[in-house]
Amino acid sequence: MHANSAISPATHPARGIFAAGALWVVAYLVALSVLDALKPPEHWDLAVACIPILAFYGFVWVVQRAIRGADELPRRIHLEALAMAFPTTMLVLMLLGLLDGPLGGRLGLPLRDLWLALPVLYAICYAVAGHRYR
């Protein structure tokens, strides 16, 4: 085994993507907790709300690097998953909007947290896209 053959993040980009995604979700939960529990004064609430935005930018950067460094097939799977995830997200949001209308806005879903469904939808679409190439 050569010294350069050690496993690196470039060899297994899924680890870096998972770590960046976990950091993003933790940053969101921390910011949400601080905003709800501490009710920071004006301008500080904006600063706290920006924390998960910075973490999300880091997540996007890690994913972008992983996709750029990927071979043609993983790149194609990611792009196909994104192509499926976007209209699927639109469909879910349309459905929730239609369901919320007759209920007078009492659907009971925290629409503020609806973005949490998006990584799940992407993961499902990624699995479907990946299955086509196996």
Image (cartoon, grey):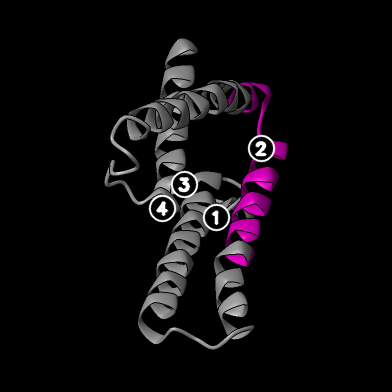
Mark 3 = which residue? 115
Mark 4 crowdedness (10 Å alpha carbons): few <14, some 14-19, many ≥20: few
Amino acid tagged 4: Asp
Mark 1 = which residue? 6
Sequence order check: which comes first, mark 1 or mark 3? 1
For marks 4 and 3, give the CA distance: 5 Å
Quadrant of the image containing the C terminus: top left
Numbered disc 2: secondary structure: helix
Mark 4 touching mark 3, by CB under 8 A?
yes
State which region is magenta.
54-76
Q: Where is residue 85 in the image (x, y as percent from the top left)?
A: 52, 27
Mark 2 touching mark 3, by CB under 8 A?
no
Q: Where is residue 21 in the image (x, y as percent from the top left)?
A: 49, 54
Identify which residue is drawn at 46% across, 26% down.
94
Identify which residue is drawn at 63% across, 55% down.
4
- Look at the image and say whether residue 67 sits in the magenta stretch: yes
